[in-house]
Each structure stands twice: as structure tokens, then as C-alpha cells.
Amino acid sequence: MLIEKKDWLATTNDPELQEKVREKIAVLQLFEKEIPAVFVVHDLTDFSVVYMSERGLNELQVNLEDIRLPNDEYHAKFFNEEDARIYVPKILGLIERNNSDELVSYFQQVRTAHNEDWVWHLSSTKIFLRNKDGKPLLTITMAVKVETEHPMASKVGRLLEEYNFLQRHIEIFETLTRREKEILKMMALGINSCEIAEKLHISEATANTHRRNIRNKIQAQNIYDITRFAQAFDLI
């Protein structure tokens, strides 16, 4: 069933823009049920949800009025803030470049209104409609659920965890000297102080001092912490 005659853009009373939005969503509704994905249309003036396909509303267990919340409330309720740090800049870049043929793809975690468990989705976003000045007015996002049994879901989770670890520790990494990064790499590879001293032509006491200072800087308690830190910053 096509949408009712109503205002879809809360941020404008322009009847011409309202009619364009109505037409675009009406076309979307004609085929959305035939595609195994969720469609979401956002108003870029305030990033509010203008429209969500029936499949999406069913997955979130809400109706359209439930998700017409201020942007921060909507995202806090349904989306994981940690992975949002990755894809939000990509979407903002898409809007700034304003290229009709461009889209951005990303993984995001979503949960229903009544469930605390996160579910991975692969999403793609592109500009859906521009205003009279040619500036982006709406974006459309297509999201496909990644089944939890699929190995990709766990891989994406690990990548996101590593990315968040990197973001939390980037300032610490930047305090390490070139020599300390070199020694940190060796530590992660299991090279002992004697071997480090020989490779770098320093005394074993100096190598031990470097190792101790590195452990203190990165707050490492064991070899796992050292290896994880070195992997996050591509030292190994």
C-alpha cells in the first residue's frame, strides 16, 4: 500500500519538496518487499528518520512514529556507538562530496527495542534526494542482516574490537620512541633481552631498561598485552 498524503519532512513546509519526498518513497514502497533488505531514509537537516521499510520496522519491533526521535536518541537506542565512530565519518564524507554515483558501505550493529543483543548488518548509503540548490537533502541506506552463524560476523567483531583498542591507545603509542617501537616488535615476537641487545648493539642492561619502560608505558601485564598492542599498530 502506498504512503498516505502527509508531510514527511519535519524540517520544511515547502510543498514541492514534500511532494518529491512523497514520490521517492512511493516508488521505494513498490519494490521494497521483493528485496531481502531494510531501507531507511534520513533527513540530512537533522539526521532524523523520514522513512523505514516494513521489514526494518518488523525487525526493530517498532512503528515509524517510534523511531522519529531526535537523532541522538534514535542512535543510542538502536545502534552501537563504538562502530558508529567508523561509519559516521564515511557518511559525512559522502554528503560533503555530493556525488550522485557514490555510495559507502560499512558494518554496523543493531538491536531491537526489546533485546539487548547486537546483530551485525552490512549497510550501504547513498544520496537519495537533493534540494533546489543541489545540496543533499535525503540519504537512503540499505541494510542486510549478517547471520550470527556466519563466520563473517565474528570476524567483523574482532576487527571492530581491534579498531576500538587502537583508538583508545593511540596517544600512548605516539609517546613511544622509534627505538621503543622497534624493541616492542621484538618483544611481541618473543625475542629476549640478550638477543635484543645483540641485534641492536646495546648492552643487555639497556635492553632490560627499554623493556621495562615499554611495559610501563603500554600498561602491559603479560605477553598477551604486548602482542595485542603490537598487532593493533601493525608492528607485527
Image: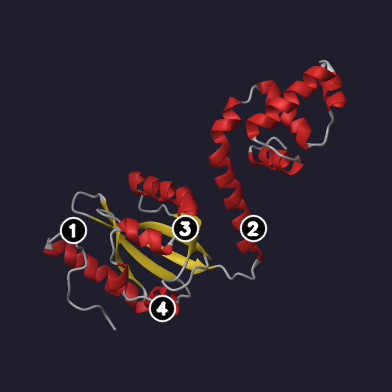
Residue at which label 2 appears: 155
CA gap, disc 1 and disc 3: 26 Å
Residue in front for this viewpoint, 37 or 86: 86
Q: Is residue 50 left or right of residue 75?
A: left
Q: Circle 3 sits on which residue?
A: 80
Look at the numbered disc 2 and give the secondary structure of its residue: helix
Q: Which numbered circle lies on residue 11?
A: 1
Point 67% across, 30% down: residue: 216
Drawn side of residue 85 relative to residue 40, left or right: right
Cβ–Cβ under 8 Å for marks 1 and 2: no
| Image location of residue 96, percent across then percent down | 34, 44
The residue identified by callout 4 is 58
Furthest residue in direction top, as rendered? 202
How packed mark 4 is, by other alpha carbons closer than 10 Å (few <14, some 14-19, many 20 or more), is few
Q: What secondary structure is marked by label 4?
A: helix
Hey, which quadrant is residue 128 in on the image?
Answer: bottom left
Rounded to the nearest whole Å, what is the CA distance between mark 3 and mark 4? 19 Å
- Mark 4 or 1, nearer chain start: 1
Residue furthest bottom in the image: 1
Q: Residues within 10 Å of mark 1 (few under 14, many from 20)?
A: few
